[in-house]
Amino acid sequence: MYRAGILGNIMTNPAELDPRQISTLIAIMKALRTPVTGCPWDLEQDFASIAPYTIEEAYEVADAIAKGDRKALADELGDLLLQVVYHAQMAEEEGSVRFADVVEAVTTKMIRRHPHVFGDDEARSAGVAKGFWEANKAKERPKASGVLDGVTVGLPGLTRAVKLQARAARVGFDWPDSSFVIDKIEEEIAELRAAGREEQAGELGDILFAMANLARHLEVDPEAALRATNGKFERRFRFIEAALAKRGKTPADSDLAEMDGLWDEAKKAGL
């Protein structure tokens, strides 16, 4: 008789349950984390060791969306959901949080933040005012001593830079327009040119921070912009590889002048 998956008073193998139910996934995770009968690898994990996988799965969801691959999206959303169940299971084991608590927290939050949808007649008729979402999020944050408190440290660098700058801008610490930011970027580039080897990383960081600020002023998501450029680079470099292959060559057999010429051809081809 199966010992790990206990539902009510009946001991049930999760493999025999309906795979379309969230309760089945929860039962699977409980079984994987059950001492002695569970999976040795899963039993060794903790919040810190699983967190990088959670971030990775979120990016894989974004990748499937960018590619327009809906089958992959279903798979990747499932992997991301598993991460939520995984963390909730570990939290339940330590007696701090249950999966139901996670669901309750997000459910009540979404209702609270959308009075124009779920509120009374007066709230619904009032609609949603500009800045309403951010204002409500701010009310929910713990009382902080500083303007920048509460900006998540684990965010991608460019995204966190934009959020830090936006917080500072709320209290007037901001350039009047993007032309000042461009001047700042040029200043930072000059400092990088003059920097010694040990100073270059810091100066490069200053340039990236200033570039994130420019993206904010232009109302451009810097992460999305960079992902788009990464994709463009991939397309053009694959064009170079294909063109060289027709010549019986590889990039290693070529030189910069030849590859640069093919790069220009890729640009003219609209890649």
Image: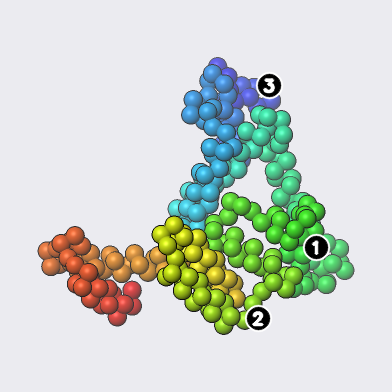
| Residue indicated by mark 1 | 115
Q: Regarding mark 2 in the picture, which secondary structure is present there?
A: loop
**Where in the figure is residue 144, as x and y percent of width and height?**
77, 54
Q: Residue at x 63, y 24 (%)?
A: 6
The numbered mark, 3 or 1, whose residue comes first in the sequence reads 3
| Local crowd size for mark 3, using a 10 Å CA cut-off: few (<14), some (14–19), many (≥20) | few
| Residue indicated by mark 2 | 176
| Residue indicated by mark 3 | 9
Q: Regarding mark 1 in the picture, which secondary structure is present there?
A: helix
Instruction: Please say if 179 is above or below 234.
Output: below
Q: Residue at x 27, y 77 (%)?
A: 264
Please tell me whether mark 3 or mark 1 is closer to you in this view.
1
For badge 1, the amino acid type reads Pro
How far apart marks 3 and 2 lie (CA) works out to 67 Å
Q: Residue at x 49, y 49 (%)?
A: 56
The numbered mark, 3 or 2, whose residue comes first in the sequence reads 3
Identify the image quadrant of residue 232: bottom left
Instruction: Please say if 225 is above or below 20.
Output: below
For badge 3, the amino acid type reads Asn
How far apart marks 3 and 1 lie (CA) works out to 41 Å
Q: Would residue 14 be found to the left or right of residue 247 on screen?
A: right
**Where in the figure is residue 25, as x and y percent of width and height?**
57, 37
Identify the image quadrant of residue 195: bottom left
Q: Would residue 141 be found to the left or right of residue 63 on screen?
A: right
Q: Is residue 114 visible?
A: no
For badge 2, the amino acid type reads Pro
